[in-house]
Image (tube, grey):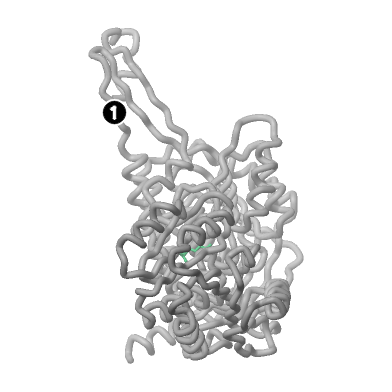
Amino acid sequence: RAALAAFASAIEVGRSGAALARPVIGGRARDGAARDVTSPIDGRTVAGRVVEASLEDSDAAMATAHAAHPAWAATPAATRAAALRRMGDLMERDTGRLVHLMQVEAGKTVDDALAEIREAVDFCRYYAAEAERVFGAPIDFPGPTGETNRMTLRGRGVFVAISPWNFPLAIFVGQISAALVAGNTVVAKPAEQTPLVAAHATALFLEAGIPAGALAFVPGDGTIGARLVADPRVAGVVFTGSTEVARIINRTLAGKDGPIVPLIAETGGINAMIVDATALPEQVADDVVMSAFRSAGQRCSALRLLCVQADVADKMIEMIAGAARELKVGDPRDLSVQVGPVIDAEAKATLVAHVEATKARARRTHLAMQAPAEGTYVAPHLFELGKPEDLGEEIFGPVLHVVRYEAGRLDALLDAIDAKGYGLTLGVHSRIEATIEKVVRRMTTGNVYVNRNMIGAVVGVQPFGGHGLSGTGPKAGGPHYLHRFATEQVVTVNTAAAGGNAALIAME
Ligand code: UN1
């Protein structure tokens, strides 16, 4: 009770003070005309105001980050890591403010906001430790006598980081912290819908000791992102968002003269879960509801296509729909609410159109809940489709689709899921070892979850990311991520000719 009271008062304190996001370049905020950031909670409340970056601001940000790169790259990895650890501590210090901003700007429940702060802090601490491992110690390779071979990693230059609204803190901070700690400077563009959380995180990075030139912040829409990606000084792009935008970035990078620039992209998924006749129904119901409807289904990891063995489908579907009906949809500041709003009116319109179209062609509508009219709420739905092919596109919201499959037709089902071309998350519920093994062997999906829910990958424990239409890899929060932000140099020295190579030998 005392902890809850302390927490409630921390959020209360977090509510005080107006939120303003402005471009920050070289540590200095830039002024300009501000617009309101309206809350999805009711469509009226002003979460704060944002001054969006102009094209000149974005060019200046790039120039500043470019000029700051040599000094930051020369900073020891341990110093860069220490700044990330301070960033983790500062986010914990500012929990109340961050929860408030995520609630009012992104419509998050307290549970989701707290989990997101945890994830952002984990990213900082994990990448700090990884940086010491990867950048702190060169790798020596054995070679012929009279020769040494040593590999060293360094940052590439300026990274452009473009982040999504569904994790306005965790992914924004995750991308930036990885790029920075690897020795890159960063120009960060948050999602147009969530500049306020990102502005606060940017201020914390600078407070944590990231040099003013090393991180520039340019809130804005796609025109800013396009300008940044097209800049000849870009050494790398890290992006989370839609497959379509990842393709556009890829084309832009490929179309430029000059160096070949890497893209690290994490995009969407039509994520499936397979439930066979041996699965535990209560566990399935709990995991399905969590995977499909938590965060109002606005996670790229969320469950979109549930596949239930026909023999048990009626019972399973009834239990799932029954459990889902217990969800409370509404103002996420109410602690008893589990499903908040979707991000904005455009997202709502897309989802409502999908719900209406699916209602008309679905075999059955098993669940159609009610949502508040004010704000941008979408009620949880569960539609039964004839076959996996009937779900053609990624749906980003609390709408779940279920199909039945016949025992003995598991291979065909896996082929159909695979044929969608995505490869982000996959769930399987079964008590038959051979079935689990078959699914895991057949599918190359990035994250496979067995007999549990399929969201909320933990940094450093469940490295997260997919391939195909779901992204490029490597996995965020995993041991290979930082390498992609770096160049590798191998120095081979003829030690027999010591006199002529004294300088190089001294590097050993
Ligand atoms: C995303 O929705 O963009 O596993 C990523 C999860 C999160 C990542 C989701 N850690 O649900």
In this view, the residue in front, 100 or 300, is 300
The answer to whether residue 97 is left or right of residue 364 is left
Q: Quadrant of residue 189?
A: bottom right
Which image quarter holds the C terminus? Answer: top left
Q: Is residue 435 something one can see in this rendering?
A: yes
Residue drawn at the location 59% of the way across and 68% of the way down: 387
Q: Is mark 1 within 8 Å of ligand 1?
A: no
What kind of element bears circle 1? strand
Residue drawn at the location 35% of the way across and 19% of the way down: 492
In this view, the residue in front, 37 or 448, is 448
**Residue 5: x %, y % from top left:** 38, 89
Q: Residues within 10 Å of mark 1 (few under 14, many from 20)?
A: some
Residue drawn at the location 25% of the way across and 12% of the way down: 146
In this view, the residue in front, 204 or 399, is 399
Q: Amino acid at mark 1?
A: Asp
Give the total of numbered labels. Answer: 1
Name, please, the residue furthest toward the left: 145
In this rendering, is residue 506 above or below 180? above
Q: Which residue is mark 1?
A: 140
Q: Quadrant of residue 48?
A: bottom right
**Residue 254: x %, y % from top left:** 66, 37
**Residue 495: x %, y % from top left:** 28, 13
